Amino acid sequence: MNALLRRAIDPRGAVVVLLAVILVAIVVLNPSFAEPGQLVRFIQRVAPIAIVAIGQYFVIVSGEFDLSMGALVTAQVVTAGNLIGTDEAKAVPVLVLMLVLGVVVGVVNGLATTLLKVPSFIVSLGTMLVIHGGVMWWTGGAATGNPADSFRQIGRGGIEGVPVLGLLPYAVLVLLAVILLAVWLSRRPFGRTLVAIGDNAEAAAYAGASVWRTKTLAFVLSSLSATVAGVLLVGYAGVHPSVGQGYEFIAITAVVLGGVVLGGGRGTVLGALTGAFTLESLFTLLNFTAVPATMRDAIQGAIIIAAVAYSGAVFAKRRRTTRPPAPASAEAERTTTSASEPSPIHLTGDSVARE
């Protein structure tokens, strides 16, 4: 029981408890939510946010931020809508172009942060503004483009005739593939090195880690996750320059809520995933309780503050309780050494005074 209690009050365990409580509350208000088909539809709706949160995890755990994700999601949606059009033959080439665009944005963010030593907050903020400005210039601020139906099926379609579920959305399968890949990467040397860099970049560099290469790859993964989320959003969100608005902050909120420490060095992929589901479950609960949608930003900001404060308090207490006391012999040796050392010397004008 003590072990379960400690796990429950841990930031990564507390979010699981919170998610369970919110889901129970939703089912009480709307019993049909517990039906398998409804749950799968809920996962389909959360999939883009969860994928973006997983991408943001790799950046935050390394000690950085990526604020360009929302703008990149919008750019990918607009690219698909305007370049594919009704010509299904263009779907694959445009998809490749979108992936290349994601890689380029990630490389630019990563190299500017690591080699040029510009803070990632400023770099990704500048990238966000550049991409957003380009999208507004391209679209004129209005909804444009309508990609082929076959491309939109990636986000809105699925495998029909599945027992119990009826329809298994492609978005759920894409999310599952992203989760498996992200967990695999986090347990490989790359993932462990990323966490080590977030904890202490200088120590990781002394140990032989390539800090600039590892962080740049983290930014690439973040941009690719935004690209995948954009592909899914084309299916049911439409082509509009406001589709990805705010996704970067939703991703950061989900990651922090999932127990990933801002500043890097602590956190897991599954924690970020759980945070995304908890955040969307909370918004779903608020919809059922008729809370205005305009309150979402305020609630999101309060969640970030509360989650960061709670994580900081828990980890600070853990450091204090796990820090071993100094051995008595070592303390005595330090006292003896300091007593035998000469007093410090101060230079005052032309005289030398010894205290």
Image (cartoon, rainbow, N blue to C red):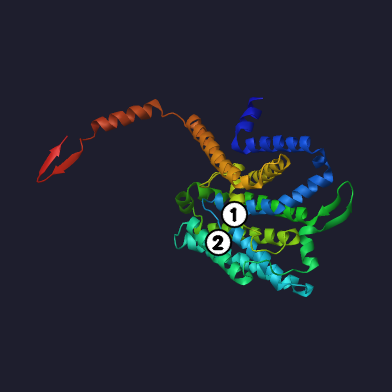
Question: Residue 222 appears in which quarter of the rendering?
Answer: bottom right
Q: How many marks?
A: 2
1 or 2: tag closer to the N-terminus: 2
Residue drawn at (59%, 54%) of the image: 248
- Residue 199 rendering spot, x and y as whole percentages: 50, 46
Question: Dot 2: what SS?
Answer: helix
- Residue 352 rendering spot, x and y as whole percentages: 12, 41
Residue drawn at (21%, 38%) of the image: 344
According to the picture, the residue beneath numbered tag 1 turns out to be 248
Depth check: give the residue in front, 271 or 194.
271
Depth check: give the residue in front, 220 or 355.
220
Q: Does residue 189 appear in this view?
A: no
Question: Dot 1: what SS?
Answer: helix
- Residue 338 rendering spot, x and y as whole percentages: 27, 32
Instruction: Assess whether mark 2 and mark 1 are in contact (beta carbons under 8 angstroms).
Output: yes
Depth check: give the residue in front, 82 or 258.
82
Which image quarter holds the C terminus? top left
- Residue 133 rendering spot, x and y as whole percentages: 56, 67
Q: Amino acid at mark 1?
A: Glu
Above or below for 140 versus 279: below
According to the picture, the residue beneath numbered tag 2 turns out to be 128
Question: Residue 10 appears in which quarter of the rendering?
Answer: top right
Q: Kindly report the distance in space between the C-alpha atoms of the residues bearing marks 1 and 2.
A: 10 Å
Residue drawn at (55%, 64%) of the image: 107
Q: Amino acid at mark 2?
A: Met
Query: What crowding class fits label 2: few (fewer than 14 Cα within 10 Å), some (14-19), or many (20 or more)?
Result: many
Depth check: give the residue in front, 178 or 226.
226
Above or below for 317 versus 159: above
Give left or right: position of 281 versus 334: right
